[in-house]
Image (cartoon, coloured by chain):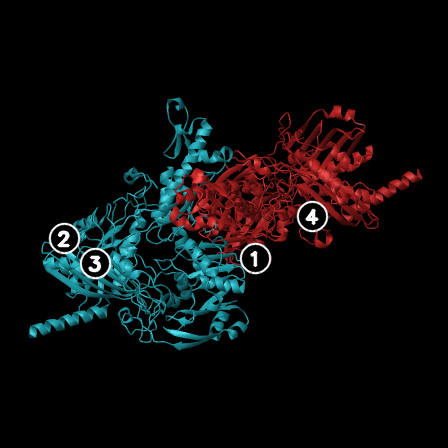
Chain colours: A red, B cyan
């Protein structure tokens, strides 16, 4: 696909303005329909019975009493969700996570489900299901799980990425390695080497809206699913495969989404809802409780990471390594691999090596959380970077600038960079007033950098022009952060009309071609690309209609400023035809005017950010307060700056929560002890300062408008930036996230004891 | 647009088969969602206050008490629906029909509306609205309304189509005239002339599902409408115009439709629902009662028609005239014009003249009902035709065959016919076993012919291929009679795949370009055309993908039997790629595969039918029984013969009801006396024989598959066919429809009295 690079520096008329988002009013007034807001006549209430054990053989499930309860229309177990995956182990894992098949693999794992006429009946029915468990030994810690005598979570798993191929089952599902150069030689060149280990605890995306769906499957094998999701087309494909349906026979509609951040890229209970509906022959609504969301939907990995960085006194990093152990919950995934890929992506390194260990434990299946895996790696690397800088006596920012990757740098994970923004964000950080602001007592400043790949992928857009010249834009990427506004701006820009004349709709799967998930910061990048091409497709039609009206060759018609203009002296008397003119005439000039595009949006631009933050630490209690926070990030072209800034701020806030408070707490019994927002505390407004932002625009040459993804990178630096700030404020290096008051206090006490011991000599 | 005429006689693989319709199971199990089945959180109940007077000045409306009632969220009158029509009188009429503006024009005319939290509150609120009426004289009969001293229904109306232009208001809104030749000269040539007058009473389409919608408009001017309709795109445009919204900002979704037959081509209360929602700032659901449906939604015209036909003894019609007076209810329309156009369309006439009078009365606004206006004209003409045949001693069928129109005939309404089916249906009728079956005592046989134009118009179709090779077809013509099955067959035929691999969805207005109404028998004709072109568009993509896979020129790839085949000796080793192969590879070969088409489907083929029926008349009571009924009609190519036959049968049944029972009864007070299915009796199964059908296929050369419309013509002949049968059974000529038992008995008694008088000399 050819792009016109001239677009990347073009003058825009509406792109870059900040009109209100079209879904805004509905969302603040409560009119917007979220996952739980759907209703179908005759719908049943679904509920899921979940294992209270982290690891147990399911000896038998007796559903007979539940089935006999009046008002119960269906009870299902894994027997009602037969394995149709045809040897596709990944799909079988998804199915097994939806409903345990013989073994419960984590506290909260679904073992049965009911559909009943109302909630009290469904609750009663759940209690009447008798499950015979044989409790098995469990493991929930990533390092414990790697020990040779650890309980095996998935007996089928053989570690990949090692030679010779192992014959025994292991909790390490894969080992991956990235890098280049000779790290041993590099470390020999170093004047200073810092080696350190870090821990991060498991967190949840913490979206406000729990998972919810309304499923309906008829005996004819046709079905519908209304669901809160980041990708209804992908949900359609997965559900169709798991249920043995044809893709075209399952129509999935995405509700408004009350937050996803990666957690709604995966099916958790939707196949269960469909199976219940199929068995009950009634629509079934399934809405998770908050406890269910915590216990059984994709949190992040907890991690254990070792970092070693060597540098010369002049500030050149000579070698860097990282060993990353990421737990994936009970099902194999690639999270450590992503950590190994991203850890050193900000830097231009001669010798670098990262090794990732993806590890199974008896916890819920991990899924994506905003730049998945990168924040933990960045915490370890960026914390160490600060220590190396300190050791050689350089400022952390100058040290980073010296080693920053640039155009042409070979990334630690393989490819060569095109034009990138890490250097500019660091320079901007260095020059930012925040860097020179005075700090008060017990306050410290930290900074850190972050990287995310961004993705492209399959995308379809239809653009239809109404008879009054207003435009409906039909896209398939769920709007999680204002993309309807951005895409409307793009359509308006191309067509030369006002933003208000465009309405962007998220099409259901019955009326548009496949769209990949809204993940990987791909929404505005990919649907923006498809929108541009669809608009240009429509402009071709508009030009043809004008040419037909004027009876002149279409080559003599150009589209300029929202109207068809006849070019050439011979046509000097022809008044330009606006889009509204041509739309009004369309019923008699050939019918409705439309443009379409189906594309694989290649060339997503990598994204970098530098964050600065000031923290105050109370040395008496270990309590922290974020005093000031600044995000500087390369957005490529910022289509709608408000929503770009919103992404920067949202990512930073989630990073702050992760850094300071959020944490899954598992007991010795392998059960989650804090599955609720009272005990799992995400930051609220009063916990936070205003998050300042600075957008840099280094155009992505692979996109007609220069767009990069913007949604994820902003969550990558906060853990490390805050760690560095706490270290500067309290004089202790924090290596364990979250840096909750008890952990900070413990670190301070331990440092004081150490100092006392040294003083006592 | 170029059509390939070879398609009209092509060999079809799946076209012409009879698979189950995709919406069938949902409809028989109750899962299908109709107009009243939608739900939005926070929705209000809407109710409309209607005038009990046929004609009254509204002196004032006091809504203050209703507004103060707890639970009432909005009360509206015409003041809340300001005139934004910018001088478009037709649009203003629509608005005024939705809500009276100063005068109530018929019994049932809306004067105010409320939205409240529940039905009891809404009912109470209606009662609290005080309307001050000044009752005006009214007129409900079409002939009365034409008298010089009749009360004027619409003071703004000046008769069009007459010279000199009238200065005074009249209830005759327009006079239209069609024909050619010299009828006076023609009548002079005639050996026999029959001149007769006929009356038909007003009927209702009698759809089972009342009008229902759920409207939601936000303060930002964006809205949604879920509605039972025959055309959600047209509803969008009309509602947007009346409410002052932009077309793209109003998303309309068509529910399943429980019958429409023309009655759901028009907005009745949808703008009221939107206005209520806008004022209440909450979603509002409006569901009509059956009484409201009868009193205030579009019935047919009652008519008064004079026919004069002259013929020579050899059977040649020498001249024919018709004067048609059709009441349009309280708002001007073109129904008499359509009657004047269709009345003689079946015949090849040298001298013909028809004059239509569109007349206003104080009855609800008339709207389309299946081949609107044609059944009444056919009743008058075809009844007279039988009498002329009898007078010259020819069989009715031979007389019709002799005068039937054929290819090249100049139609009485203007154009020259292409290939048409009236002759073949008559020949088929003549040869049908029904024609030779023995009749019992008090039984008579009648036949009649019918004509309908059929329409084409604006249509859009998107076709998307899923990764498993199943296909979603997205169309915008509401499925009233199985078009999803027909369109799926067409897509399957073009793509060379199984019918079951296609799912056809009716897209909402946000995700497809404009589609005209499902009316004029255009659904399968026009969306079929767009589907063919969209499928061919997708096949181009499939060929490109295959060529890319094989690395050969696309010109060397043909699409045959559902797969891409490499042509030429050089490619002999290449295994054909099926649609499923190419679909599975699509994510890596360029992305989703789709086809699109926007078209003005020109060239709808005219349609003809001949019906035969046997009636038994009880001479003691006037009661009738339909003994046998046969429909013979030209369908062009019958895509799904079951649903073609269903249309034939449904039209015949509605015609039977109209002919024998159905009738609006207005009292002297101008109020409708029978607004319910108990007193307005539509035929039920036990009233009917099996309706036999015979499909003739005279391909329409203007359609790639030869499709004609099939939905309407079948309602045209029944009134006359039954009239002719009753005449043959009871020996009396019926000139007043419905031929209810009292009317038949009266005719028999009157004939007996006449005979007695003659015998007494």
The Cα–Cα distance between marks 4 and 3, rounded to whole angstroms, is 81 Å
Q: Which mark is residue B655?
A: none
Question: Contact (CB < 8 A) between labels 4 and 2?
Answer: no
The Cα–Cα distance between marks 2 and 3, rounded to whole angstroms, is 23 Å
Residue at 41%, 66% in the rendered image? B96
The Cα–Cα distance between marks 1 and 3, rounded to whole angstroms, is 78 Å
| For discs 2 and 3, the disc positioned in front in the rendered view | 3
Of labels 4 and 1, earlier in sequence is 1
Q: Which mark is residue B353?
A: 3
Chain of the residue under the numbered disc 4 shown in the image: A
Dot 1 crowding, Cα within 10 Å, few <14, some 14–19, many 20+: some
| Quadrant position of the N terminus of chain B in the picture | top left
Is disc 4 placed on a helix, strand or loop? helix
Chain of the residue under the numbered disc 3 shown in the image: B
Q: Foreground residue, A552 or B61? A: A552
Instruction: Please determine whether, in this image, residue A659 is positioned above or below residue B713.
Output: above
Is disc 2 placed on a helix, strand or loop? helix
Q: Which residue is mark 2?
A: B398
Q: Which residue is mark 4?
A: A653
| For discs 4 and 1, the disc positioned in front in the rendered view | 4
In this orientation, does residue B238 appear? yes
């Amino acid at each position: 696909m050819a792009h016109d690079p001239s677009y990347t520096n073009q003058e825009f008329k509406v792109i870059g303005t900040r009109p209100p988002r079209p879904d805004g009013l509905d969302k603040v007034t409560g009119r917007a329909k979220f996952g739980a807001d759907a209703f179908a006549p005759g719908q049943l209430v679904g509920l899921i019975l979940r294992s209270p054990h982290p690891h147990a053989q399911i000896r038998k499930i007796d559903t007979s009493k539940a089935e006999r309860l009046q008002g119960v229309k269906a009870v299902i177990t894994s027997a009602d969700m037969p394995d149709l995956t045809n040897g596709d182990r990944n799909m079988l894992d998804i199915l097994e996570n939806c409903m345990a098949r013989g073994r419960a693999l984590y506290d909260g794992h679904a073992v049965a489900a009911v559909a009943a006429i109302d909630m009290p009946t469904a609750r009663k029915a759940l209690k009447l299901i008798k499950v015979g468990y044989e409790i098995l030994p469990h493991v929930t810690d990533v390092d414990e799980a790697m020990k040779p005598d650890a309980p095996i979570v998935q007996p089928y798993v053989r570690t990949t990425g090692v030679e010779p191929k192992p014959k025994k089952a292991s909790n390490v599902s894969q080992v991956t390695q990235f890098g280049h150069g000779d790290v041993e030689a590099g470390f020999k060149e170093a004047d200073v080497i810092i080696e350190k280990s870090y821990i991060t605890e498991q967190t949840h995306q913490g979206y406000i809206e729990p998972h919810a769906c309304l499923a309906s499957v008829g005996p004819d094998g046709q079905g519908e699913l209304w669901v809160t999701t980041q990708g209804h087309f992908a949900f359609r494909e997965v559900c169709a495969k798991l249920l043995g349906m044809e893709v075209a026979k399952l129509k999935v509609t995405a509700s408004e989404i009350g937050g996803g951040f990666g957690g709604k890229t995966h099916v958790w209970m939707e196949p269960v809802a469909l199976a219940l509906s199929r068995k009950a022959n009634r629509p079934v609504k399934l809405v998770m409780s908050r406890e269910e969301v915590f216990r059984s939907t994709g949190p992040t990995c907890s991690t254990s990471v070792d970092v070693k960085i060597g540098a010369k006194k002049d500030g050149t990093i000579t070698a860097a390594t990282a060993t990353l152990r990421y737990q994936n919950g009970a099902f194999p995934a690639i999270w450590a691999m992503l950590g190994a890929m991203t850890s050193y992506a900000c830097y231009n390194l001669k010798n670098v090596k990262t090794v990732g260990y993806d590890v199974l434990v008896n916890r819920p299946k991990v899924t994506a959380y905003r730049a998945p895996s990168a924040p933990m790696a960045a915490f370890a690397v960026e914390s160490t970077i600060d220590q190396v800088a300190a050791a050689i006596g350089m400022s952390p920012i100058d040290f980073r600038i010296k080693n920053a990757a640039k155009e042409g740098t070979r990334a630690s994970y393989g490819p060569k960079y095109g034009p990138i923004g890490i250097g500019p964000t660091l320079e901007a950080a260095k020059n930012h007033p925040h860097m020179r602001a005075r700090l008060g007592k017990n306050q410290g400043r930290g900074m850190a950098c972050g990287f995310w790949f961004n993705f492209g992928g399959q995308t379809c857009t239809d653009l239809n022009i109404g008879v009054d010249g207003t435009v409906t834009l039909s896209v398939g990427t769920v709007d999680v952060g204002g993309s309807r506004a951005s895409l409307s701006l793009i359509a308006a820009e191309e067509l030369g009309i006002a933003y208000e004349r465009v309405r962007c709709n998220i099409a259901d799967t019955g009326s548009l071609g496949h769209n990949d998930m809204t993940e990987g910061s791909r929404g505005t990048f990919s649907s923006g690309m498809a929108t541009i091409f669809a608009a240009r497709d429509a402009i071709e039609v508009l030009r043809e209609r004008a040419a037909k009206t004027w009876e002149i060759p279409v080559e003599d018609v150009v589209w300029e400023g929202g109207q068809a203009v006849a070019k050439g002296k011979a046509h000097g008397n022809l008044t330009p035809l606006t889009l509204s003119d041509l739309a009004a005439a369309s019923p008699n000039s050939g019918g409705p005017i439309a443009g379409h595009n189906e594309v694989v949006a290649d060339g997503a631009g990598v994204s970098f950010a530098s964050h600065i933050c000031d923290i105050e630490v109370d040395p008496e209690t270990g309590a922290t307060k974020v005093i000031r926070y600044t995000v500087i990030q390369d957005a490529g072209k910022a289509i709608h700056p408000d929503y770009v800034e919103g992404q920067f701020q949202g990512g930073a806030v989630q990073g702050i929560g992760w850094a300071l408070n959020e944490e899954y707490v598992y007991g010795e019994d392998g059960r989650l002890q804090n599955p609720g927002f009272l005990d799992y505390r995400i930051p609220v407004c009063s916990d936070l300062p205003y998050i300042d932002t600075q957008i840099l625009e280094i155009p992505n040459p692979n996109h007609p408008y220069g767009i990069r993804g913007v949604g994820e990178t902003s969550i990558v630096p906060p853990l490390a930036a805050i760690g560095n700030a706490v270290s500067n404020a309290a004089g202790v290096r924090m290596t364990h996230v979250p840096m909750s008051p008890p952990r900070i206090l413990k670190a301070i006490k331990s440092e004081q004891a150490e100092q006392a011991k040294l003083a006592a000599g």
